[in-house]
Structures are given as structure tokens and as C-alpha cells.
Image (spheres, coloured by chain):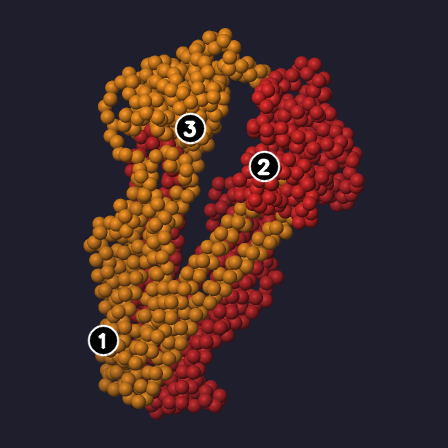
């Protein structure tokens, strides 16, 4: 969809709302612009001295009534128009999130979360300003401006021409000053990030600074930056010190000019004082719309720039929408001649081949960077493997709809990511319909039992920021429970016990044998204690399979695996020392 | 005093808007810039006169020139007339009109100049105070104990230096002077209205009472809803942040739909909070307009009546109308000020608390001058130390490094190697036992003068944003460029510099981005070398590099260690083998000491560590030699 189409779709969805907002705006304008006329009539009566206390009461009563009507209808204008902008903001944010949820994982590796957040927060906010206050003030300026100028012409054409000479200056000044302000402000922001980065570097590198006794140099360096920061801030302050006084000046000069021209007309009898007072009141009502005009133009410029940046996100093609298909297959995994690299010049896997039979527990072992995790992510299609290289139950994973694949294959990722929810909420993450009993069973199978007893609220304990900070091992076990609760026939464990001590691990593994009974398990691990439990071990080296067999077989072979086992034995000895 | 006593919510707390103790200290910050402040206040007084002149001149123009009636006199216009006559200006007819409007223009121009200058001076004052504060905070942190940095996250220190200082800006620029300005202008209007017509003034000011209540209602409501909106948007953002960071988990567990509906709830709460806040704005502005119109109605009614009875002129009524229109702004400004004051008090409290934290590791009263030339003999005797009370990391460490010797510290993670380096640099005070350099207890030196003789290479190479030359010289302009270049060549950076177009002036991005791991290490070696320290502290990096770089690093380390006392946390076989003494640490104690050969023959802990950590390196070296 084109940027403008997507943008205006939010408006065309609610035509009535905008009509109502502009309608009440018209009403309030009509009401308050009647007041100057009333004031004029009161003055006329005064001049003719044909006025009675009665007519005075009527005039002031009318003024108050009209003002009340104006206040009430403008209340609705603001409520309706700004409220609509909040509704649209809500929809845009919701749509954006829905879109992001459907973007492929490789795209997220290339884009930092910070940048995405800035689009979703800062840019969206700029767009909201454009459609909320932007639209409201624009409409206000147009309506009030047109009506007031029309009424001013009715009073006196030359006077109106004189008065109108200052309002474009006000609008222009606001617009130009707004742009310069924005530029200087951005310059300050840029420098702010420089000064705070350098301070942050100093604080983080405090040991280095102290060891080299460079406190003095660092202070001088900071002083330099601080001075530049001061300079830029003063540049903005100078501009700010000019802006409001300048507006006041234009308004004041306008009134002085009008006073002079009107004075001449009154002296020559072409204008009455009453009409002059009326004219003055119209002029007062025009000041804000003129300022708003300059301001709104800036809002629109920034808003459209932000919308274009947001469109860059919309333009990223999402994953195709797929439905979960009821496929029945035997849970075997077959990796056949799998070659893969994230960048073409660096192949991580070159022709890896192995098979996991239904119900078998196979362990993948190998050095860092040997491609173990890559195999798991290819099975899950976090990246797409080459056609035919990975098959689940004899079907190419590329031919299985994503929702189905991920229903059939469950995973405990290497880096545990939990959400700031309750423990139960995290465990049932993939199965929101799970019963309390199921959640508890999964937690116990993952070895969380003793921890739960220590938590004040058990499974209802909140994880993360406002709750309890879990230890690395507790996090991993929660992630394990999250995977176990799904009824997926295939389970992938990516180095899932690295932060769990050996004793706990043994306890989990014995539980796991029951909980994962009958499941096909492919696990990545370095630990002998884990590996020993696998039915078969596949050793990866240099992107291919170096050896495979049971723990005992591989030890006997004296290859890569037995070297690994030897290292771990010594490591344990050193740690015990 | 610890800075982070209440870590979680310290930064959110809002307290009183006025705290005499803090205000006194804040006032002392203003003193160096007092002339700007005093000047601005003087301008403010002048400005409020010119501001008030406009309506007065309009009234006089109407009463004296446009609609002169005998018998009707207005005090304000009379005042203006007398003033004009004293100046010799005409007060009737076309000439009078021209004089009056010129005067009007002059007052407008004067207001412009005065306001501009006043705002500019107040911001100079505010910015000056902020500049001073930033300098002071930064300087303070250059002397604060290292333990402060252990206890305080860098983010919080940054908040003190940035956000908290900014909160004070509001206080100085739009707070104190503008506050006075609002009060003066309001007082001026009040005085003027009472001078023109006390009865009408009283009635007009009756409007101030409901205005005050409406403003107060708005201030409280808007503040509460604003807080609510802030909490809700924070929730929206953290939900987004969390789900975008964990997007793969969301997708793997087919959680998209549910995440979307959860997000809808959070998103909607934010929407509702905003719509609630619209209510306050939607009521407030029209209500103020309405009240001022009521005031206008009252002026028309009463003023008209008085004009009828001849006790007031039309010009005076017009002046009244214009003055009453000027109520709002100062009044609304006043209500904003409360929140600014409150935030400023909270921020200044936090800043002062940091500035009040006195460092414990400082120069003694009469520091022993650091020996020059410095021989570089290091001796630890029975050193105990723990970062936390009751948890000793070092349990009686004793060793001596004679001038020029290389000592290799070896042991498992957490055995206390890095702690020894920290104590040598006097980052912390020893619990018990002594650290002596050249036979003198290090606590008797000025720590900064003492550290000048040290050079350090950290385990995690830390480079600053800046050029290679700046990183090597550590931004010290007194180090000549030839020395920098020589040091770079000596550690083997020559080929890199030749390859880079900018050479030494190649700009590194954050944390040395743009260079490989090995190159970054070499830069940090050059940094230590160019400072030519008597004692070198080297914490070897564990990250593996390709064999070629490894050779370069080994050669560079060789050059770095020669001719100076070196204490090395060693991982490299080559470094360990060439050490004069190897100390094997386990759980804060020295278990074994001797040369490589001696320790291998002992077949103890070292022999096992060697087998574990170093066999791989040896094998890799063999392989690369065979391949090369």
C-alpha cells in the first residue's frame, strides 16, 4: 500500500468524527465572533447616551451566554479531534506491532531493537502530533481566520489591510523560528549524545583513567565538550529569547498602526469608536490562529518525515500468512548434506548429515562456532535451510506451514529469554490454555520444584523488573518447562543446562526422561554428564560430522570426543583444588 | 555514605517544592553568575512598565483625542496627558494622534528589546550554573573511589550529570526570574486597574477567584493524568521492547496472536489515559476563556453604567477590557512553576548527595614524594582483602617483584589474580597487610602521583571514541607525535597504519569499532608503551585470535615487558614461560611459586592448569608452524 493511502485509510474509517469535530469548531467560532459585535453595540448606545441599565444588562448577559456556548462547543472540538488522534495513534501502533510480529527473524538480526523502538515511539508521536493538535489547530486557524477577516472587512477595508500586514509576519516568524529551533535543538541533541558518550566512556573506563593518572587530561577534555555544549545551548537560548518578544512586537506594532489609521478615520468621522473597539477585539482573536499556523506547518513537516520513516517498516515484506495444518507424521529428523552460511563467503555447515529416529535422544557436540545452534535454528526455520536438506517425518521442513512446524517442534533456546510475567505465564507461554496442573507438572519436570518453595508466591511469582530476578539456572529451567508443556513430539535443547549445576542437572535429566518420554530429542551440550545420557552422540567439526556413536564407543575411539572428555576431567580437578 | 541506598525508585521520588537547606545551596551556585540575575531583574521591572503602557495609551488616545468630552475625566488619561504635556508633546488633534501612536510604538519596541535581553540574560545565568555543575560532578567523579563505580551503575551517574542538571535549568531559566516576572506583571495590572477605577477593579478581580480554583483543579488533574500517561506509555514501550527483543521466542512459540491482544490491552490503557487527560485540557482552556468573557461582560455592564453616570470615560473602559485580557498568561505560568520547583528540588538533592560523597582513597596530609627515579620494586606482605565484608578474596598474599622482574599470576577464574592488580594500583585499600613499592607503604603516596609510574593493559581492551593517536596518547597533547608513532611501530601496528588512509588519525567509533580484536589489543599495548611506565600491569585477554596476530601479540608483549617490573595475569604460554616468577593462585592464596620448569617438575596444580589451558595453544602453535 502506498504511504498516503495507508495514512488516509485511518481517516476515512471515521468520517463522521472529523465532520463532528469541525462542526463544533464552526459553532464555537460563530458564537465567540458574535461577541465583538455586541460590545460594539453597547458602545454605540453609550455614545448616543440612549442606553438604559436594562440594555446594558442584556448586552452583558448575551456576552456571557455566547461565551458559555463557545466554551462548551470548543470543549467538544478538543475532545473529538484530539480523542480521534489518540484512537488513530492506538490503531497505528497496533498495526505496526502486528506487522513487526510477522517479520522474518533474519530481518531482526539486521535491525537493532533501539531503532525499531525509535520508530514506534518517537516517529509515531510526531505523526500523532500532526493528526491531533496539527489538524485541530489548522482547522481552527482556517475557520477563525476566514470568519474574523470577513467581519473585519465589514468594519473597515483600509483598517483591515493595515491589520493584515502583521499577521503573515507572525505566521512566518513562528514557522522560520520553529525550523531554526528544531535545527539548533537537533544540534544540541547530537552534541548531547557526544558529551554523554564521552562521559559514559570515562565512567566505564574509570580504571584505565586512574591507572594512567589521566584525571587532569580527562577533566580538560570534558571541559572542552562542556563549553561547546554550553555554546550550542546558548545559541538556542538566544533564539528563544528572540521568539516571544518578536511576536509581542509584531502584535503591538499592529495595534499601534491600527490605532493611528483608525484614529485618523475617527477624527475625519469615517469610523466610530464603537466600531474601532469591535475591530480591536477581532484582531485579538486572530493572534493565536496566526501563531498556530506557523507552528502547524512545522508539525506537518516533522510528521510527514516521521511517517515516511515508519513507511520503511511497513514496506518490509512479512512472512506469508500460513494456517496450522493437521499433518500426522512420525517424529523423525533427518539432516541430509546440509550446507549453510549466514554470509556466502563463510560457510558454517558443509554437508552435515545425520538422523534422529522417533523417540531417540541424540546429542550434538562440537566446538564454539561449529554450527550446532545453526542446525537447530534451521530445523525451526528461523532461517530457511536449502530445499530438501532437513526433513521432519520424511517431509521437507520448507513444505510444512510454519505454525505446524512450530507446533510439532519445541525448543529451549541457548539464550534464555523470559518475559516480565509470572512464572506460570512464562511456562504456559506457548500454550495459554494449559491448566494449573499441567503448568505445575511441567515446572516439576524441569526441576523447578525446590525453587518454587522458596519463592513467596510460587508459580504466581513475577519474573523480571518488578518481580524476582531469577538466577541463570532458574531461568533455563523455566525455559525448559515452557518447552515441556507443549505436546510437541520433537524437542530441541540448545545447551540448556549450561547454567545449571551438575547435581541439579542430573535431577532434571531423570525427570526429563519421564516428561519427555517418547519424544524425539536433539540436544546440544558440552557436558559429559549430559552427553552420557544420550542414546547417541553426533560430533560436529568444521561444519561436518566428525564422528558419532554412544558415549562409550566414542571414548574408545580416542578422537575429538575423547579429548573433550579428558579436558573436562582436568577442569573438574582444578575446580576442586 | 553510599549513593545508592534506595536503588529502585530513588530517581522517581518527588518531594517538597521548597526545601530551605537545598535552596541555600542552590543559591550558592548562582552567586558566580549573580550579575546576569540582578540585571535580568532590573530589566524585568522596566519591562513591566512598558508592558502596562499599551492599554494606557489606547485609553488616553480615545479620551483625549478621539472622543473628548467636557466634564468627563479619567485619572489614568489625565496622568498620561500631564506626562505628555511635560514632555512638550501635542495632546490633541492629528498631531496628538501621531505623538500618541509613536509613543505606543516606542513602548512596543522597548518591550521587545527589554524582554529579549532579559530572557537572554536569565538563560545565560541558568546555562552558566549548569555548566559549572557538570564540571563539578565530572571532576568529583574523577576523584571518587573506584568502589563507588562498583556500587553505582554508570546509567545512574549519567542521570546525575544530564537529566538532574537539566531539571535545574528549568528552575533557573523559566523558574526564578519568570516567577518574579509573573508576580510583578500581575501586581502591575492590579495596581493600574485600581488606580483607574477601584470599584470596577474589585469586580473584575472577583473573576480571579474562580480562575484560581479552575487553574488549581487543572494543575492537580493534569499532573495526575500526566503521571498516569507516563506510566502507561512506559508500559507500552517496555512491552514493545520486550517482545521485539524476544521476537524469536514469540514466533517459535506461536504467540503472535496472543501477544497482539495483550498489546491491545496495554495500548488501550495508554489511549484511555490520554483521553482522560484531554478532558482536563478541554475543560481548562474554554473555562478560562469563559471566565474572561464573564469579566468582559461585567466590565461592559458596570463600565457602561459608570459612563452613563459620567464617572468613567470610554477610554478607561477600553483600557479595562485590554488589561483583563492580559490576566491569563502570568496566572497559568504560575501554576506550571510548582511542578518545576518540585522536580528541581528532587534533582538537586540527588546531585548534592553525590557531591557530598567524600573519597576515602586520597593523598595523606603530608604525602611522601614518589621516589624519582623510581626503581619499581613491588612487595606484598600478608595482604588480606575482600570486596564485601566477611568475604575475603585474598587471604594472606605475600610476594616480591624485584625491579625489572616479570611476575606471572596464574589460576582459575575467581582465584584473586585481578584483585592483586587492583590493590597494586590502589583502587582499594587492603584489609590487612601491606603493599610497598620501593620499600615505602603505598598509602603514604598521593595516589595520582603514584599511579603516574604505572601502565596498564586491561583484559577487555577498552578504547575510547577518537583517533588511534588519541587513544595511544590517551588524549595527552604533551606526548609528541613521533613518540606515538614509534610506540605503534614497536608493537607492530606499522602495517595497519600503512593500510589505513588516515594512518594515526583513523577515527575509532565506540569501543574501538572498526578494528579487529587483535588490532585493538595492539593499540592498548602501544598506549602502555608510550607512557613508558616503571611498573606494567597486564591482564592478558583470553579471546583467541588467528595465529598470525597471535605471533604479533606475543612479540609485542615481549617488548612491553622488557626493562620494567611487570605484574601479569597470564594466559599465554609464551608469557608464562618467560616470567621470572610464576605465582599459582587458588581461592585467594598462593599455592605454588617458581619458574615454569620448576613448577612442571612439581606436578601440582600448575601442571594440571598447564595441561588444561595451554596444551591447546601449544598444539595450535605447532599446527600453524607446520602449516606455515
Instruction: Kindly identify which numbered label has been placed on residue B211.
Output: none
Q: Which residue is mark 2?
A: B520
The residue lying toward the viewer, choosing from A51 and A354, is A354
Q: Which residue is mark 3?
A: A341
> Which mark is first along the chain, 3 or 1?
1
Residue at x 50%, y 66% (from the top left corner): B119
Cα–Cα gap, marks 2 and 1: 85 Å
Query: In the displayed image of the protein, which residue is found farthest to the bottom?
Result: B70
**Circle 1 marks a residue in which chain?**
A
Residue at x 41%, y 64% (from the top left corner): A176
Residue B8, x across and y down, in percent: 48, 41
Residue at x 78%, y 36% (from the top left corner): B375
Residue A396, x across and y down, in percent: 30, 22
Tag in front: 2 or 1: 2
Tag in front: 2 or 3: 3
The residue lying toward the viewer, choosing from A88 and A6, is A6
Q: Which chain is orange?
A: A
| Element at label 3 | loop
Does the residue at mark 2 contact the one at mark 3 (Cβ under 8 Å)?
no
**Side of A572 where B526 appears, left or right:** right
Asked if one can make out residue A231 in the rendered structure from this viewpoint, the answer is yes
Cα–Cα gap, marks 2 and 3: 27 Å
Instruction: Kindly identify which numbered label has been placed on residue A58.
Output: 1
Quarter of the rendering occupied by the N terminus of chain A: top left
Q: Which chain is red?
A: B
Amino acid at each position: 500500500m502506498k504511504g498516503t493511502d495507508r495514512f488516509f485509510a485511518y481517516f476515512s474509517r471515521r468520517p463522521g468524527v472529523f465532520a463532528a469535530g469541525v462542526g463544533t469548531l464552526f459553532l464555537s467560532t460563530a458564537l465567540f465572533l458574535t461577541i465583538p459585535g455586541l460590545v460594539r453595540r453597547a458602545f454605540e448606545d453609550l455614545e448616543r447616551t440612549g442606553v438604559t441599565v436594562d440594555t446594558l444588562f442584556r448586552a452583558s448577559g448575551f456576552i456571557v451566554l455566547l461565551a458559555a456556548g463557545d466554551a462548551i462547543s470548543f470543549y467538544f472540538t478538543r475532545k473529538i479531534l484530539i480523542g480521534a488522534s489518540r484512537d488513530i495513534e492506538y490503531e497505528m501502533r497496533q498495526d505496526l506491532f502486528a506487522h513487526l510480529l510477522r517479520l522474518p527473524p533474519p530481518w531482526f538480526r539486521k535491525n537493532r531493537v533501539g531503532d525499531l523502538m525509535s520508530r514506534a515511539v518517537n516517529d509515531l508521536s510526531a505523526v500523532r502530533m500532526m493528526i491531533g493538535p496539527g489538524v485541530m489547530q489548522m482547522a481552527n486557524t482556517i475557520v477563525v481566520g476566514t470568519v474574523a477577516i470577513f467581519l473585519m472587512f465589514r468594519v473597515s477595508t483600509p483598517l483591515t489591510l493595515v491589520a493584515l500586514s502583521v499577521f503573515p509576519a507572525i505566521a512566518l516568524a513562528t514557522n522560520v523560528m520553529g525550523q531554526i529551533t528544531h535545527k539548533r535543538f537537533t544540534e544540541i541533541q547530537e552534541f548531547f549524545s557526544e558529551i554523554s558518550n564521552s562521559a559514559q566512556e570515562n565512567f566505564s573506563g574509570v580504571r584505565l583513567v586512574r591507572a594512567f593518572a589521566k584525571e587532569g587530561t580527562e577533566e580538560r577534555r570534558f571541559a572542552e565538550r562542556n563549553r561547546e555544549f554550553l555554546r550550542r545551548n546558548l545559541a538556542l537560548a538566544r533564539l528563544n529569547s528572540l521568539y516571544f518578544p518578536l511576536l509581542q512586537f509584531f502584535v503591538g506594532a499592529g495595534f499601534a498602526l491600527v490605532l493611528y489609521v483608525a484614529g485618523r478615520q475617527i477624527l475625519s468621522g469615517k469610523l466610530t469608536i464603537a466600531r474601532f473597539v469591535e475591530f480591536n477585539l477581532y484582531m485579538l482573536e486572530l493572534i493565536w490562529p496566526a501563531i498556530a499556523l506557523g507552528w502547524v506547518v512545522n508539525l506537518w513537516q516533522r510528521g510527514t518525515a516521521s511517517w515516511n520513516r515508519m513507511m520503511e517498516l511497513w514496506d518490509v515484506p512479512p512472512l506469508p500468512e500460513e494456517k496450522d495444518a493437521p499433518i500426522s507424521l512420525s517424529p523423525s529428523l533427518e539432516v541430509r548434506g546440509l550446507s549453510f552460511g549466514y554470509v556466502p563467503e563463510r560457510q558454517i555447515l558443509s554437508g552435515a548429515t545425520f538422523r534422529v529416529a522417533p523417540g531417540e535422544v541424540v546429542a550434538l557436540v562440537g566446538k564454539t562456532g561449529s554450527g550446532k545452534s545453526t542446525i537447530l535454528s534451521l530445523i525451526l526455520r528461523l532461517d530457511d535451510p536449502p530445499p530438501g536438506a532437513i526433513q521432519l517425518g520424511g517431509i521437507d521442513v520448507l513444505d510444512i506451514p510454519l505454525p505446524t512446524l512450530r507446533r510439532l517442534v519445541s525448543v529451549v533456546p541457548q539464550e534464555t529469554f523470559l518475559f516480565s510475567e509470572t512464572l506460570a505465564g512464562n511456562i504456559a507461554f506457548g500454550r495459554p490454555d494449559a491448566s494449573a496442573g499441567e503448568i505445575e507438572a511441567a515446572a516439576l519436570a524441569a526441576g523447578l520444584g525446590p525453587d518454587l518453595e522458596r519463592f513467596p508466591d510460587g508459580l504466581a511469582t513475577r519474573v523480571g523488573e518488578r518481580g524476582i530476578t531469577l538466577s541463570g539456572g532458574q531461568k533455563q529451567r523455566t525455559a525448559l518447562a515452557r518447552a515441556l508443556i507443549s505436546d510437541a513430539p520433537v524437542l530441541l535443547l540448545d545447551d540448556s543446562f549450561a547454567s545449571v549445576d551438575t547435581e541439579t542437572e542430573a535431577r532434571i535429566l531423570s525427570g526429563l526422561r519421564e516428561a519427555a518420554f517418547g519424544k524425539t530429542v536433539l540436544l546440544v551440550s558440552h557436558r559429559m554428564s549430559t552427553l552420557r545420557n544420550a542414546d547417541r552422540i553426533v560430533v560436529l567439526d568444521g561444519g561436518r560430522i566428525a564422528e558419532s556413536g554412544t558415549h562409550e564407543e566414542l571414548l574408545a575411539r580416542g578422537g575429538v570426543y575423547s579429548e573433550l572428555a579428558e579436558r573436562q576431567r582436568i577442569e573438574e580437578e582444578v575446580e576442586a583444588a | 555514605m553510599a549513593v545508592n541506598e534506595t536503588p529502585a525508585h530513588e530517581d522517581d521520588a518527588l518531594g517538597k517544592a521548597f526545601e530551605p537547606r537545598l535552596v541555600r545551596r542552590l543559591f550558592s551556585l548562582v552567586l558566580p553568575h549573580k550579575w546576569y540575575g540582578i540585571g535580568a531583574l532590573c530589566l524585568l521591572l522596566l519591562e513591566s512598565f512598558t508592558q502596562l503602557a499599551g492599554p494606557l495609551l489606547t485609553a488616553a488616545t480615545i479620551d483625549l483625542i478621539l472622543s473628548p468630552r467636557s466634564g468627563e475625566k479619567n485619572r489614568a488619561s489625565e496622568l498620561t496627558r500631564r506626562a505628555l504635556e511635560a514632555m512638550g508633546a501635542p495632546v490633541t488633534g492629528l498631531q496628538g494622534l501621531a505623538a500618541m501612536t509613536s509613543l505606543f510604538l516606542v513602548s512596543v519596541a522597548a518591550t521587545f528589546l527589554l524582554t529579549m535581553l532579559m530572557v537572554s540574560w536569565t538563560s545565560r545565568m541558568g546555562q552558566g550554573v549548569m555548566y559549572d555543575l557538570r564540571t563539578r560532578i565530572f571532576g568529583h567523579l574523577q576523584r571518587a573511589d573506584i568502589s563507588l563505580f562498583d556500587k553505582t551503575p554508570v546509567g545512574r551517574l549519567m542521570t546525575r550529570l544530564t537529566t538532574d542538571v537539566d531539571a535545574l535549568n528549568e528552575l533557573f531559566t523559566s523558574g526564578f526570574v519568570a516567577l518574579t516576572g509573573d508576580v510583578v506583571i500581575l501586581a502591575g495590572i492590579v495596581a493600574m486597574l485600581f488606580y483607574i477605577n477601584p470599584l470596577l477593579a474589585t469586580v473584575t478581580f472577583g473573576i480571579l477567584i474562580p480562575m484560581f480554583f479552575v487553574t488549581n483543579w487543572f494543575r492537580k488533574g493534569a499532573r495526575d493524568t500526566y503521571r498516569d500517561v507516563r506510566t502507561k506509555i512506559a508500559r507500552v514501550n517496555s512491552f514493545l521492547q520486550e517482545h521485539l527483543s524476544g521476537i524469536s521466542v514469540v514466533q517459535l512459540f506461536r504467540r503472535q496472536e496472543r501477544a497482539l491482544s495483550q498489546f491491545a490491552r496495554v495500548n488501550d490503557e495508554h489511549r484511555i489515559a490520554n483521553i482522560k487527560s484531554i478532558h482536563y485540557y478541554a475543560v481548562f482552556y474554554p473555562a478560562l476563556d469563559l471566565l474572561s468573557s464573564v469579566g468582559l461582560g461585567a466590565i461592559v455592564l458596570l463600565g457602561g453604567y459608570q459612563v452613563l453616570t459620567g464617572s468613567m470615560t470610554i477610554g478607561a473602559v477600553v483600557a479595562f477590557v485590554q488589561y483583563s485580557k492580559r490576566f491569563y498568561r502570568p496566572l497559568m505560568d504560575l501554576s506550571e512553576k510548582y511542578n518545576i520547583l518540585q522536580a528541581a528540588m528532587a534533582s538537586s538533592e540527588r546531585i548534592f548527595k553525590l557531591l557530598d560523597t567524600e573519597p576515602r582513597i586520597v593523598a595523606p596530609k603530608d604525602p611522601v614524594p614518589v621516589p624519582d627515579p623510581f626503581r619499581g620494586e613491588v612487595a606484598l606482605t600478608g595482604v588480606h582483602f575482600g570486596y564485601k565484608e566477611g568475604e575475603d578474596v585474598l587471604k594472606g598474599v605475600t610476594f616480591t617483584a624485584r625491579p625489572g622482574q616479570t611476575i606471572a599470576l596464574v589460576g582459575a577464574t575467581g582465584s584473586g589474580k585481578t584483585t592483586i592488580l587492583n590493590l597494586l594500583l590502589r583502587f582499594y585499600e587492603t584489609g590487612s597487610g601491606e603493599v610497598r613499592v620501593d620499600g615505602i607503604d603505598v598509602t603514604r603516596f598521593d595516589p595520582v602521583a603514584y599511579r603516574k609510574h604505572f601502565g596498564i593493559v586491561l583484559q577487555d581492551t577498552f578504547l575510547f571514541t577518537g583517533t588511534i593517536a588519541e587513544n595511544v596518547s590517551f588524549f595527552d597533547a604533551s606526548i609528541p607525535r613521533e613518540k606515538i608513532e614509534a610506540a605503534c611501530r614497536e608493537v607492530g601496528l606499522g602495517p595497519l597504519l600503512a593500510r589505513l588512509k588516515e594512518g594515526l588519525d583513523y577515527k575509532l567509533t565506540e569501543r574501538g569499532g572498526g578494528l579487529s580484536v587483535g588490532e585493538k589489543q595492539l593499540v592498548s599495548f602501544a598506549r602502555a608503551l608510550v607512557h613508558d611506565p616503571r611498573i606494567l600491569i597486564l591482564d592478558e585477554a583470553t579471546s583467541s585470535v588467528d595465529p598470525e596476530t597471535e605471533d604479533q601479540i606475543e612479540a609485542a608483549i615481549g617488548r612491553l615487558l622488557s626493562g620494567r617490573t611487570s605484574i601479569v595475569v597470564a594466559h599465554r604460554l609464551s608469557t608464562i614461560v618467560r616470567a621470572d616468577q610464576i605465582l599459582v593462585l587458588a581461592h585467594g592464596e598462593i599455592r605454588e611459586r617458581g619458574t615454569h620448569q620448576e613448577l612442571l617438575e612439581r606436578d601440582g596444580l600448575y601442571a594440571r592448569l598447564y595441561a588444561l589451558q595451554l596444551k591447546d595453544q601449544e598444539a595450535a602453535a605447532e599446527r600453524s608452524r607446520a602449516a606455515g
